[in-house]
Amino acid sequence: MDGEISADELWELLQADEPIRIVDIRSPGQFRRGHIPGSENVPFAELTERIDELEGDDRVVTVCPHGQASVQAARLIDSFEGFEGRVESLETGIERWPHELATDGGNAPEDPDAPDAPF
């Protein structure tokens, strides 16, 4: 893991159209209620099964509610043998994201039985 990234640093990267993949590890329900525009939902419980989807990405930022579980997710991604890019965790979590959130649902499938917690 390459450390943590602040909300302002991530916002600047997004505004500059830098190639970055934002992986939100919250539940699909939480993701639908509000997420960083351009992020994708990969719930923590599915991360090990889907980690190969990140192979070839140069930079990944993981996002969770408060910036704690995303550190674990970033470490998991970084330990994946096929991943050679930079991986960081959003230090403040989505709860302290100071910019507008998208609520369109992105790529999160509708699952009313999914738990809201990442674990």
Image: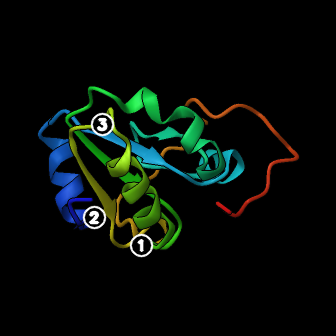
For residue 96, the mark is 1
Sooner in the amino-acid sequence: mark 3 or mark 1: 3
Label 3's element? Answer: loop
Sooner in the amino-acid sequence: mark 3 or mark 2: 2
Which residue type carries mark 1?
Arg
For residue 83, the mark is 3
**Residue at the image position 20 percent from the left and 64 percent from the top:** 8
Label 1's element? Answer: helix
CA gap, disc 3 to disc 2? 24 Å
Q: Give coordinates of residue 16: x percent, y percent.
A: 11, 40
Does 70 sit left or right of 5 as displayed?
A: right
**Residue at the image position 58 percent from the left and 29 percent from the top:** 107
Q: Is residue 20 above or below residue 113?
A: above
Does 38 sit left or right of 28 as displayed?
A: left
Viewport quadrant of the C terminus? bottom right
CA gap, disc 3 to disc 1? 28 Å
Which residue type carries mark 2?
Ala
**Pointer 1 with pointer 2, Cβ within 8 A:** yes
Label 2's element? Answer: helix
Which residue position is annotated with label 2?
A: 7
Q: Is residue 15 visible?
A: yes
Does 78 sit left or right of 14 as displayed?
A: right
**49, 31: nearer the viewer:** 49
